[in-house]
Amino acid sequence: MFLLKLAFLNIGRNPRRSLITVLAVGVGLAALIFLWGFSDGTNNQMRENVIQLLTGHIQIHATDFERTLAPELTIPERSQVLEQLKSIRSIQTVTERIKCEALIGTSEKSRGVLLTGIDPTGEKQVTSLADHIQEGEFLSPEDTRKMMIGDRLAKKIQIALGDKVVVMTQAMDGTLSGYAYQVKGIFHTGSQAIDEVSAYITLSSARELLSLENNTHEIVIKLSGRKTISSVLDQIRAKLDLNQYEILTWNQIMPEIEQWVAWSEAIIRTILLAVMVVIGVSIMNTVLMSVLERTRELGVMMAIGTTPKQIVSLILLETLILEFFGILLGLAGGYAVTAYFGKVGIAFPELEKAFSKSYMSTITYTQVEAFHVVQSIIVLILLTTFIGLYPAWKAGRMQPIKAIYRP
């Protein structure tokens, strides 16, 4: 308790220098919290964009369908699978899809696409594709000869709303199949991977095109959130024969998203380390100046019986007190800024073309993970305390007589 009182008194001797040190720690930590908030917000939005626009949380296929897209690989005992999924409470809704590679075009231009047959009613409940219609309308169940395409694809093959295009693909029996479809809707998601290579028709129309009768290639599952994926996955695997089905989570279907997240977090950690070093040096300078100014005083303390260990403890305690108040300031400032931009967002409309190559949104809403804040604080305390050992060690090695009579 005596050392704690003495530490506060020593810090208060030069309030300006102590305040500057606290501000350095606080501003540095606040900046790191904001950076983590921006990174976590961007990464979570990217994950949700993939889930809501494309994959859902979990997908079920016949074994090896995701890799080959072979039209004959339909889901075995489809009706029974759907019934078994209904018994899992955490599943909010499911929808069916048919997928194939196809050639879409006019008399002048054509392009390879991923053609997806959807149940319009079920798709609206699982994905947000209907919210991205730019021109025209979303498909309805009775649209047997109509389709939706991405705006980039429409520009590539030079078609507009209401135009007719021909779709050619391989049917289930290996024969070539094709129909003409009228463009009912043009969508814009902001993702190049979707807007340039995706086309949608109704589930019934896709079954007719591929001669699939009542079969399905894909069952898409929507959950309440990503946190429930693991438990639901275990329940699904317990109900289905894993030799017949492949059960994939969204990040298994799109592994590049998590790779991007790991890369962006590595950048933030590099910045974190650099900021920590700057803060640590600032604290070391403050404490070192304090030690040099109190050389005679510390010499007297050692002459009357204060041990070197107590001197080192006193200096480190002063360092920790400065860190503590800096951390409180950083937490308050960092969370305030992150909460503000979590509501209003940070817009980057001019970077849409760059963002379109991934699944990033042009407006980022910051949200920081508590784990990253705790990680930053732990690194801050460890690193600055380690750097602060130098002035403490220097003070502990003083010789009382020399310290007292130092000019």
Image: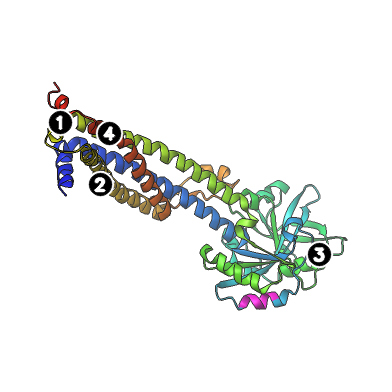
Residue 363 coordinates in the image, percent (x, y): 48, 50
Mark 4 Cα within 10 Å, few/some/many (few <14, many 20+)?
some
The quarter holding residue 280 reads top left
Q: In the image, is residue 3 above or below residue 118?
A: above
Q: Is 82 colored magenta in this rendering?
A: yes
- Total numbered circles: 4
Q: Earlier in the sequence, mark 4 or mark 3?
A: 3
Which residue appears at 52% of the width and 68% of the height?
224
Inter-mark Cα distance, 3 to 2: 66 Å
Which tag, 1 or 2, sits closer to the chain's start?
A: 1
Determine crowd level at label 2: few under 14, some 14-19, many 20+ residues with C-alpha closer than 10 A: some
Which residue corresponds to mark 1?
Answer: 299
Name the quadrant containing residue 269. Answer: top left
Q: Which mark is residue 393?
A: 4
- Residue 251 in the image, given as x and y percentages of width and height: 60, 56
Amino acid, disc 4: Trp
Give the residue type that dot 1 points to.
Answer: Gly
Q: Main secondary structure of the magenta part?
A: helix
CA gap between label 1 and label 2 equals 29 Å
Mark 1: secondary structure: helix
Question: Which of 123/358 is in front?
Answer: 358
Q: Is residue 369 magenta?
A: no
Q: Which residues are magenta?
A: 81-86
Secondary structure of residue under mark 2: helix
Q: CA distance from mark 1 to mark 4?
A: 14 Å
Sequence-first disc among 3 and 1: 3
Residue of label 2: 325
Q: CA distance from mark 3 to mark 1?
A: 87 Å
According to the image, label 3 marks what residue?
A: 72
- Image quarter of the C terminus: top left
Above or below for 223 versus 45: below
